[in-house]
Image: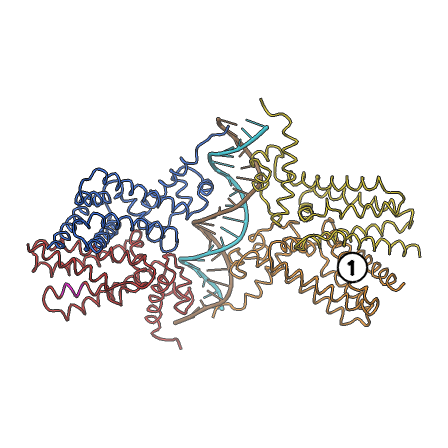
Chain colours: A yellow, B orange, C blue, D red, E cyan, F brown
DNA sequence: AATGAATGAGGATTCATTCAT
DNA sequence: GATGAATGAATCCTCATTCAT
């Protein structure tokens, strides 16, 4: 009797293991064997389910982005009004699900991967597009035509704080990062209205 | 007497080739042979002059940081007053020497390298420290105690714009990035004085 | 289910091939690829099973020493009385299992290896210790306190004859070497009793 | 003005450096560069004077054998009678010129080299032949036809004690080795006369 | 479904040797 | 006489990937 329905379990385990391994090694140079061992299976099986290393990385990337997206949607569902929605979007990026060391390290990996893999580039572009769209959507009622520029700066600051956090040894400071971005949001809105 | 004085020439060629190769491949996984070929020599000679791959990378990193540092010092020398100095520092980071695609790609490499190599981490910390010190030094006369927080945000935005630029195909938009940071500088100063 | 149980087969094949290759080349500078080719596999597999070149050498050394030890134990089991046991120990060292050209060449390798690798040094020390202990154990009933000195000389002569044999082209002369050592044993016993 | 007469000086320095380097590294795998550096010159010059690595080794080997030979001849010149001459030959092999750690290590190298290089084999054969001839020459008046067998055993013991000494960390025990061989010489002579 | 077995391709590194000056 | 410059060839080792079972 073949075990049925193992595929999604195995795939999920590998995705988790990929992120964890990148975080644990602190390096982008993780091997398929290391990932598979951490996921409790042979590297051959990892290839069987994903076809190749790049696809494992892409799946991990999709997972991180999906978790992030769900987080944002959940926060937006509970927020009322543009200002509250903006705050929700920003907070979601730095909360404890996304702002763990291994996830941050994985992001760095994905940025590097995006320079080689078109698919990774596309995923990253989708993420950036959604973030920008979310910000612009709720900024426009507040600041009108200044919205795109503000969104670009906010997005840049968010990415930069992620990058800087990726280099810190020790626990990441999500609260501090959130405060910085919210402060900047405040300034931008005031500035646009002045 | 043998041919003399090749060492500095070879080392410089390898440093340039390292940056160029990273830029051309778009990947962090460049080999010593590729670098050496681009620099017009055998990989054995590259090892002879640098001792190993990591030291080649570190030399390239030092070069990028040195060029950046020289640029900043040059700009500061011609600037009068805190405001002008702040603008000079920001402009220097995005001018054509530093904001070329291959240099941006190299920066990404160095961020990744810094997670593994203590020496690379140290170099990056020095860069971050100098940037922060420069910004704080000229912000304090304008905004007092708000200076460190502002500097952190400005630095984060700068890093984030670099990161985003690193993903763009096509020519980087240094002018746009500069405008964003200067705009934010303006907002922060106004905000602090209000 | 995959093909199973290859590991011991492969390891044994590599150990044999190592000894054979050293014997065939007459040189200590054999490469992993040469060994692996002789063993009928890729060098990558050799690394997979042993981890590295030195460990392959050490395994070969352990094998030679184990075969020698087994030979000695077997001979001792059938010998009655100190004199017979001494003869058995001496004969075992020069019988056809141990005194083949490739094994002799391997010994030379191990002596060289022992100067660099602590583990190899330890193995060689164990061999020397066992030989000395065996000789002393059966000499003492015959010659009393003269035993250790005699054992040292007998051991030295044995090693020296191995070394000299290692240089000879052509088939080794185990019978001649045995006769020399037995003759010396006889002299020493008579001398101690006189 | 070219420096005249440098050749013998350079060659001698390289020979000394070869022996010293083998002793210092404890390994047979010394590089030409290491030898040349120790001798205070470039590796290119070492090649210029010797033509290649093997020839450097051979020259070092010839040197060791020449020093040994001179030592023996010197000792023989002062010895009167066969017995005294035999003792002189044995002592010469273990005195402080020959029985230094680096020289012992070099011997091991030469034994290994002799399996590959015909010239090295020839040199070693010459050494063995001379030793045997010396021993036989002075044994014959004492023991008659037993001389060759005794010489073979004495030679074997000498080589074996060298080999064993080569593995010891710490200072070599020339006096102990000499005593062992002289004791055996005594036994053999008594045994032959009985 | 799952994995041990196996390898080809490649990569960093070393080194003896050659050459122009 | 002397050496810095330079490299081809080789070596150990790693790893993604494939395959038979």
Q: In the displayed orientation, state which residue is furthest to the bottom.
A: D1
Q: Main secondary structure of the magenta part?
A: helix
Image coordinates of residue C155 in percent, x first then y, are 24, 52
Asked whether, in this view, residue A42 is left or right of residue D9, the answer is: right
Residue farthest toward the top in the current orientation of the protein: A1
x and y percentages locating residue A35 in the rendered image: 59, 41
Which quadrant holds the C terminus of chain B? bottom right
| Disc 1: which residue | B154
Res C109 visible: no
Which residue corresponds to the image point at 63% horizontal and 25% vertical from the top-left? A4
Image mark count: 1
The chain holding disc 1 is B
Image-quadrant location for residue A74: top right
**From which residue to which does the magenta span run?**
D85-89
Residue at image location 34% in from the left, 70% down from the top: D7
User: Residue C157's spot in the image, x, y percent?
Assistant: 21, 53
Observer-nearest of B7 and F7: B7
Judge the density around disc 1: few (<14), some (14-19), many (≥20) Cα neighbours within 10 Å: many
Indicate left or right for A172 with D44 as reference: right
Identify which residue, C14 or A70, lies in the foreground. A70
- Observer-nearest of A47 and B29: A47
């Amino acid at each position: 009797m073949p075990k049925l329905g193992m595929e999604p379990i195995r795939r999920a385990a590998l995705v988790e293991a990929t992120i964890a391994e990148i975080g644990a090694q602190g390096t982008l140079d993780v091997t398929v064997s290391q990932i598979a061992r951490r996921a409790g299976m042979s590297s051959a099986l990892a290839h069987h389910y994903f076809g190749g290393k790049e696809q494992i990385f892409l799946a991990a990337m999709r997972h991180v982005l999906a978790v992030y997206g769900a987080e944002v949607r959940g926060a937006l569902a509970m927020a009322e009004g543009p200002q509250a929605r903006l705050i929700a979007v920003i907070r979601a990026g730095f909360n404890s699900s996304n702002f763990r060391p291994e996830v941050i390290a994985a992001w760095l990996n994905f940025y590097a991967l995006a320079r080689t893999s078109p698919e990774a580039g596309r995923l990253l572009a989708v993420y950036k597009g959604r973030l920008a769209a979310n910000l612009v959507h709720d900024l426009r009622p507040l600041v009108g035509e200044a919205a795109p520029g503000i969104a670009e700066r906010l997005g840049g600051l968010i990415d930069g704080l992620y990058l800087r956090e990726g280099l810190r040894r020790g626990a990441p400071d999500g609260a501090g990062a959130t405060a910085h971005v919210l402060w900047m949001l405040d300034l931008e809105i005031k500035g646009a209205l002045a």
